[in-house]
Amino acid sequence: MAFIEFNNVGITGLSAAVPANVIDNYKYTQYFAEDVVKEIVDKIGIAERRFAPDDICASDLCYAAANKLLTDMAIDRNDIELLIFVSQTPDYRMPATSVLLQHRLGLAKHTMAFDINLGCSGFVYGLSVIYSLMQSSGLKKALLLDGETRSRIYSPKDRKTAFLFGDGGVAALVEADPKFGKSFFSLNSDGSLENLIKVNAGGYRNPSTPQTLQERVVDEFGNIRTDEHGYMDGAEVFNFVLREIPANINALLDKANLTQQEVDYFVLHQANQFMNSYLVKKMKIPAQKVPSVIAKFGNTSSVSIPLTIVSELKNNLSGDKKLLLSGFGVGVSWATAAVNFSNCYISDLVEI
Amino acid sequence: MKEKFLELIKETLEIEGRELAIEDKFKDYEEWDSLGLLSVIAAIDEEYGVVIEGNKFKDIETLDQLLDEINKSK
């Protein structure tokens, strides 16, 4: 079990950017009848999402969020020594988007920069890598950028995924400081479930061809997509989450010697309202400890945990707080962390 | 057990105006769809503490078989 403990590293500032373009899910009816849409949207509880226009990438959302954060907090950009970009919707196949962001953000050449390719577990994984590097190296300041344009991965003609996903980008400033004390991470993966959520073609295993871009009917319900669209087996994902996540959260609390009562907020990956509320009910966590943005922004993959903090906890993070973060999804991959916040600065949400 | 199970499925799939029988092929219900499947998975987990794997669900046809699977998995 990859269970890791860190000392004296924490998030000191957090910002988020979303596209200004709001999608009203109940009116997202170009391919499905209004009553069909209503039944799905009621169940998944996603009233609105944000879609980035074609010329805005995940990196642009992260750039806007990072710029806002560094300016708000008056951070000297020369002091940033590490930048990690978490995404599965990068600008190019190469070079790594993190390197482009180092230059764009005006960071120094002594910045260590690389990408992490993970989905819904990505923010927690990224955080663990930064905590680890900072603790072992003595680096003082790092930026964790996490952005997704998930709206572009899925077919609008496949009702299993057409109403779920939205776009967003976040920036977290991570600093070494004894005030943070101990943090705890549990990091996991199960590649035997690779087919639960997947984009089959367009990589190097199944390269892009005219055929992989061909739309076709894929099931008895008449859903339509190409091999380069994402697909999801919702029921199997739900099973995976029920089987692994409550147990993982409890195991982490146990290792961290924490009770549910001692945690101020449980910030869970925002998958959909049905899954999230069942999870919270199953774990018997009081609803007021579980902030949610699923209705406003939909499922933004790895972005959803920090976006929830920026959007919902801006006025609740003064003083010392204990947060439990849990991300789970494509891979499948899941990660849970218990981290301390201490007067964390939260920027106003940026819209671009 | 059987009556309680039938009532649970009926409630979960929001079936109104008729009773369910244990030999019903539930996937033929007009109320059955992929969203209904999610609700049934959650309801069975909540009521019986059992998570039915998706590949097992694919082979199950009748409510009787579903109840058997629950009992086997407990």
Image: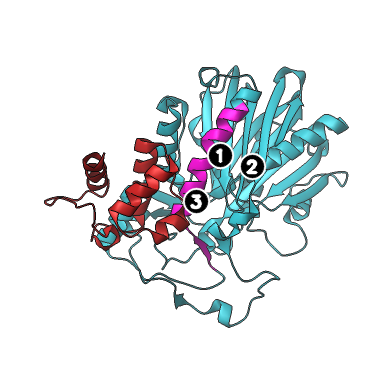
Chain colours: A cyan, B red
Chain letter for the residue marked with disc 2 in the picture: A
State the predominant SS element of the stretch in magenta.
Answer: helix
Between disc 1 and disc 3, the foreground one is 3
For label 2, the SS is helix
The tag on residue A123 is 2
- Decide: is A316 above or below A325: above
Nearer the N terminus, badge 3 or badge 2? 2
Check if residue A86 falls in the magenta segment. Answer: no
Tell me the residue at 54%/58% (across/down). A197
Look at the numbered discs 1 and 2 and tell me whether their residues touch, using CB distance below 8 Å. yes
Mark 2: give few (<14), some (14-19) or many (20+) Cα within 10 Å: many
The type of residue carrying mark 3 is Val
**Nearest the eye: A75 or A289:** A289
Quarter of the image containing the N terminus of chain A?
A: top right
Q: Which residues are magenta?
A: A229-252
Chain letter for the residue marked with disc 1 in the picture: A
**Residue at the extreme bottom of the image, as rendered:** A210
Residue B25 in percent (x, y) is at: 27, 60
Q: CA distance from mark 1 to mark 2?
A: 7 Å
For label 3, the SS is helix
Between disc 3 and disc 2, the foreground one is 3
* Discs 1 and 2 share one subunit: yes
Residue A284 in percent (x, y) is at: 43, 27
Does residue B53 appear left or right of residue B2 in this picture? right
Residue A283 in percent (x, y) is at: 46, 30
The tag on residue A237 is 3
Corner quadrant of residue A161: bottom left
Corner quadrant of residue A174: top right
Q: CA distance from mark 3 to mark 2?
A: 19 Å
Does residue A49 appear left or right of residue A197 in this picture? left
The tag on residue A305 is 1
